[in-house]
Image (spheres, rainbow, N blue to C red):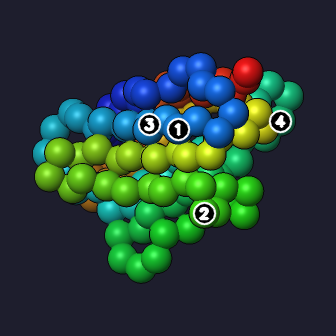
Amino acid sequence: QAQLVESGGGLVQPGGSLRLSCTASGGSFTILSAGWYRQVPGKQREMVAEIPTFGNTNYADSVKGRFTISRDNRANIIYLQMNSLKPEDTAAYYCAVLTDRAPNASWGQGTQVTVSA
């Protein structure tokens, strides 16, 4: 399975922006689909954005118009551009990818995003 490392999290004021990166490594593979998810303590992990192999991206209603998921297929990196951040976006953000080398998705360790004045 691919090994994933997320980066780009941190503390940002409301209305600010962050760009998360998820770098996949560990052999030769093709990323088929990928997604970003988030979780706050005591709550279930929720989907934020997904980018399929083909077709349209998918976003949670709460982030539509503010977040953008994209991918660099050559570098095996998945990005999440987050604009107009709100305190309710505070969470640990995880990326997941499905490759052509494994039947199950690989998950990263997460990166913390805190939106606070």
Q: Give the number of the disc on residue 20.
A: 3
Q: What residue does disc 2 label?
A: 65
- Check if mark 3's residue and mark 2's residue have beta carbons within 8 Å: no
The amino acid at mark 2 is Gly
Residue sitting at 49 percent across and 69 percent down? 57
Mark 4 against mark 1, which lies toward the viewer?
1
Mark 3 against mark 2, which lies toward the viewer?
2
Q: Give the number of the disc on residue 30.
A: none
55 relative to 49 in the view: left or right: left
Question: What is the spatial separation of the Cα atoms under label 2 and label 1, in whole angstroms?
Answer: 13 Å
- Check if mark 1's residue and mark 3's residue have beta carbons within 8 Å: no
Q: What residue does disc 4 label?
A: 43
Q: What residue does disc 1 label?
A: 17
Q: Position of residue 78 (x, y in %)?
A: 35, 47
Which of pointers 4 and 1 lies earlier in the amino acid sequence?
Answer: 1
Residue 106 position by quadrant: top left
Category of crowding for the residue at label 3, using alpha-carbon neighbours closer than 10 angstroms: few (below 14), some (14–19), many (at least 20): many
Visible residue check, residue 83: yes
Q: Position of residue 83 (x, y in %)?
A: 55, 46
Question: What is the spatial separation of the Cα atoms under label 4 and label 1, in whole angstroms?
Answer: 24 Å
Which of pointers 4 and 3 lies earlier in the amino acid sequence?
Answer: 3
The amino acid at mark 1 is Ser
Instruction: Give the structural element (helix, strand or loop) at label 4.
Output: loop
Category of crowding for the residue at label 2, using alpha-carbon neighbours closer than 10 angstroms: few (below 14), some (14–19), many (at least 20): few
Question: What is the spatial separation of the Cα atoms under label 4 and label 3, in whole angstroms?
Answer: 21 Å
Question: What is the spatial separation of the Cα atoms under label 2 and label 4, in whole angstroms?
Answer: 24 Å
The amino acid at mark 3 is Leu
Mark 1 against mark 3, which lies toward the viewer?
1
Question: What is the spatial separation of the Cα atoms under label 1 and label 3, in whole angstroms?
Answer: 10 Å
